[in-house]
């Protein structure tokens, strides 16, 4: 492991003492994800040298890949990849091809050696580079062990990744963009911090579902569904109206809170004959809706943006 300088060690210790789960600011429904955030753009060298090298303990590596549901078919990018452990473990255990990017050429050389020793050199790639210049478009899974302000600087770029892409961060959150899941992992050999444990946070990039949508229920030419969605990250406020002569088990109007998971949102609306489940999926710019009554009757509809 690269020796830590006094400065980086102090930075690491200071960083580790900041409460990992900071209180989230209140959300404002209606603002699209990341709408008001300036993009740091490629090359933000002000952070370049500020993230110290601290290894993620192996139990935390396991937890990060586990919470992300790493699987064959994924493409992993670890930003600031250190000795390559996240990339190598994902390849070794799950057959996931990966890219590790680190500013430090010695760590990149060490990662290549470790990948060879683990027999996964054909699946992984390690490059010397700045994480702010790294093209993330191809990733289905991005892992981070950086610092809070670096996570925040990356946030606008992460929010523009394909819906469903997972982002996992060791210890640090993303400000008011709440994780979809978090857990605390015992880390007896953690080299920094007073508590021998780590926080692991998962975000699933939400599709932009916000807007007004309208379409007819299939097989019900006189039932027009209108949906208005306000969105803040994954949090949705959904108002709907059914005009014309819809099936009697469906509610005519209402408002519910829901969450987007990637390009899908599922919610339950109270109906005259029991709860009605609605699933929405964004596909090719249209919203596929399906309403399922308490009796199990399905009413699909294809909604267009209006
Ligand atoms: C806390 S370590 C994490 C290492 C590894 N991902 C892990 O979890 O074990 C952060 C790493 O980021 C690297 N780093 C710092 N700033 C960077 C930058 N701007 N671009 C790429 N790597 C950077 C450091 O060299 C260090 O190896």
Image (cartoon, helix red, strand yellow):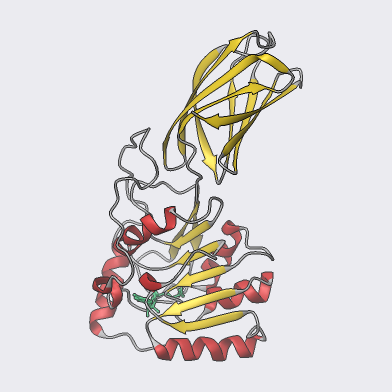
Q: Which x, y percent locates residue 69? A: 62, 58
- Number of labels in the image equals 0
Residue closest to the eye, 126 or 8: 126
Could you say which quadrant of the image residue 116 lies in? bottom right
Residue visible at 53% across and 21% down? 226
Q: Is residue 287 left or right of residue 184?
A: right
Depth check: 108 or 147 in front? 108
Look at the picture and state if 285 lies above or below 58. Answer: above
Q: Choose top left, top right, bottom left or bottom right for residue 282.
A: top right
Toward the viewer: 229 or 283? 283
Q: Is residue 183 above or below residue 32?
A: below
Q: Residue at x 26, y 68 (%)?
A: 14
Vertical order, 193 against 5 (above or below): above
Residue 222 in the image, given as x and y percentages of width and height: 66, 12
**Quadrant where the N terminus lies?**
bottom left
Q: Residue at x 35, y 68 (%)?
A: 193
Percent position of residue 240, x then y: 52, 20
- Splitting the image into four quadrants, where does ligand 1 fall? bottom left
Q: Is residue 297 left or right of residue 282?
A: right
Counting from the top left corner in percent of width and height, residue 149 is at 29, 61
Q: Residue at x 49, y 73 (%)?
A: 57
Q: Quadrant of residue 140?
A: bottom right
Tell me: 162 left or right of 30.
right
């Amino acid at each position: 492991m690269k020796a830590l300088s006094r400065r980086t060690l102090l930075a690491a210790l200071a960083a580790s003492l900041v409460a990992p789960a900071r209180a989230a600011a209140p959300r404002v429904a209606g603002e699209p994800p990341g709408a008001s955030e300036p993009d740091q753009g490629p090359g933000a060298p002000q952070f370049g040298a500020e993230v110290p090298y601290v290894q993620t303990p192996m139990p935390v590596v396991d937890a990060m890949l586990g919470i992300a549901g790493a699987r064959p078919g994924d493409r992993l990018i670890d930003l600031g990849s250190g000795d390559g452990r996240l990339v190598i473990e994902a390849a070794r255990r799950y057959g996931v091809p990966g890219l590790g990017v680190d500013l430090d050429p010695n760590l990149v050389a060490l990662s290549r050696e470790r990948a060879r020793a683990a027999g996964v050199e054909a699946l992984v790639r390690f490059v010397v580079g700045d994480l702010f210049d790294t093209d993330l478009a191809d990733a289905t899974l991005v892992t981070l062990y950086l610092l809070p302000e670096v996570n925040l600087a990356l946030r606008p770029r992460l929010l523009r990744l394909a819906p469903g892409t997972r982002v996992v961060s060791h210890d640090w959150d993303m400000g008011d963009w709440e994780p979809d899941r978090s857990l605390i992992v015992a880390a007896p050999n953690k080299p920094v911090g007073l508590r021998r444990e780590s926080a692991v946070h998962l975000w699933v990039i939400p599709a932009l579902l916000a807007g007004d949508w309208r379409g007819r229920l299939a097989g019900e030419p006189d039932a027009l569904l209108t949906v208005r969605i306000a969105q803040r990250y994954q949090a949705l406020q959904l108002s709907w109206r059914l005009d014309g002569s819809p099936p009697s088990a469906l509610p005519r109007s209402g408002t519910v809170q829901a969450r987007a998971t990637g390009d899908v949102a599922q919610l339950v609306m109270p109906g005259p004959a029991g709860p009605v489940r609605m699933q929405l999926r964004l596909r090719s710019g249209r919203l596929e809706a399906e309403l399922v009554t308490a009796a199990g009757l399905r009413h699909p509809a294809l909604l267009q943006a209006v």
